[in-house]
Amino acid sequence: MIPRLLILASALSILTPMADAAPLSSGDLRRLGFTGNYRGDVQGNIAVKNGSNFDNFRVDQRDNEQLPPRNRSVVTGPSGRNGFFLNLQKITGNERRATIRLFYSGVSRNPDYDEDTVGSGVKIMKVLRRGTSRPQFEMKLTDKLDERAFDDGEYLTI
């Protein structure tokens, strides 16, 4: 009985590193087959400061994401009139899963508020591969960008 448990424990310890998420590069994403355009439906909310209150707008549209992502790109802020940097932070994963973390940063002039704003937030893409001979890929996207006034830190869009 003890040798069987030892063999089972040894087998599990050999399989465990393959299940862990390891640091990956953009080249690793290509090698593992996670590259391409991912298209789907985006749903969420945008809250825009209007005087002392926030106006909430529902987002329901089609979008696409390109993998591997660029190390740094300029993206439009929630108001659609100014831009912030989107920086690649890290990629982790294995043969079945990949998680790509990016963060928003930068200061930009927002003409709607007529002031400089600071963008901050995170974008996380989780990709799952299903099947082996003809794999199917599924992406879950979490995207949160906050825009604050540069002078006093007041939230303008969330």
Image (cartoon, grey):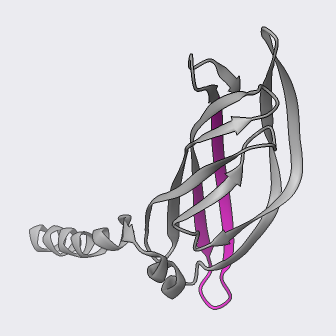
**Looking at this rendering, what residue extends furthest in the top direction?**
52
The residue positioned 57% from the left and 69% from the top of the image is: 70
Residue 54 occupies which quadrant of the picture?
top right
Q: Quadrant of the C terminus?
A: top right
Q: Is residue 118 depicted above or below 69 in this figure?
A: above
Whether residue 153 is visible to the viewer of this picture, yes or no, is yes
Direction bottom: furthest residue: 133
In this view, the residue in front, 71 or 59, is 71
Q: Residue at x 71, y 24 (%)?
A: 156
In the rendered structure, the answer to whether residue 81 lies left or right of residue 67 reads: right
Residue 158 shows up from this direction: no
Of residues 65 and 119, the one nearer the viewer is 119
Residue 40, x across and y down, in percent: 81, 62
Quadrant holding the N terminus: bottom left
Q: Main secondary structure of the magenta part?
A: strand
Disc tally is 0
Q: Is residue 45 above or below residue 52?
A: below
| Magenta part of the chain | 124-147
Say whether residue 15 is left or right of residue 112: left
Q: Position of residue 75 (x, y in %)?
A: 69, 54
Q: Residue at x 47, y 77 (%)?
A: 95
Q: Is residue 135 magenta?
A: yes
Asked if residue 66 is among those painted magenta in the image, a careful observer would answer no
User: Residue 89: image x %, image y %?
Assistant: 45, 57
**Residue beneath the point at 84% across and 25% down:** 56
Quadrant in which residue 148 is drawn:
top right
38 or 76, nearer to the observer: 76
